[in-house]
Image (cartoon, grey):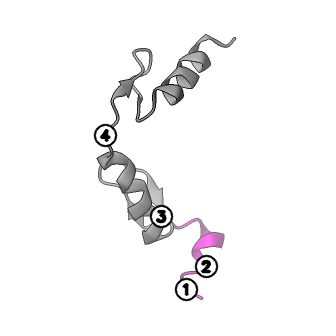
Amino acid sequence: LFIHQRIHTGERPYECLECGKSFSWRSDLICHQKRHTREQTHKCLECGKSFRWNSNLILQQHSHTKP
């Protein structure tokens, strides 16, 4: 019950030390941390975000040109 209450209170005790994002569940933090360890070679020169796949980079670049 205590753990379930986090849904209603918004408590997020698990914080990523890499980027500061917080999570209610430890398992979500672990999944998130894997994103930081994967190789991300495609970097957007506009905002600095990096992507594992070139197709995601292209989508990101289009978001900068939309009015």
Rate crowding at label 4 as few (under 14), some (14 to 19) or many (20 or more) other CA atoms within 10 Å: few
Q: Is residue 40 left or right of residue 11?
A: left
Mark positioned earlier in the residue sequence (1 or 3): 1
Residue type beneath disc 1: Phe
Numbered badge on residue 2:
1
Look at 33% across and 46% down and name the residue there: 36
Residue named by callout 2: 5
Q: Secondary structure at mark 2?
A: loop
Q: Which residues are magenta?
A: 1-11
Among all residues in the image, which is located at the extreme right?
Answer: 67
Disc number lying in front (4 or 1): 4
Main secondary structure type of the part rendered in magenta: loop
Quadrant into which the N terminus falls: bottom right
Tell me the tag on residue 54: none
Cα distance in 3D space between marks 4 and 3: 20 Å
Q: Which mark is residue 28?
A: 3
Provide the residue designation for mark 4: 39
Number of numbered discs visible in the structure rendering: 4
Q: Residues at badges 1 and 2 in contact (C-beta under 8 Å)?
A: yes
Q: Which percent across, then down, holds residue 8? A: 66, 71
| Distance of label 3 from label 2 (alpha carbons) | 16 Å
Of labels 1 and 3, the one closer to you: 3
Give the mark nearest the N terminus, 4 or 3: 3
**Who is closer to the viewer here, 34 or 3?**
34
Q: Residue at x 67, y 13 (%)?
A: 66
Q: Is there a contact, CB below 8 Å, between mark 4 and mark 2?
A: no
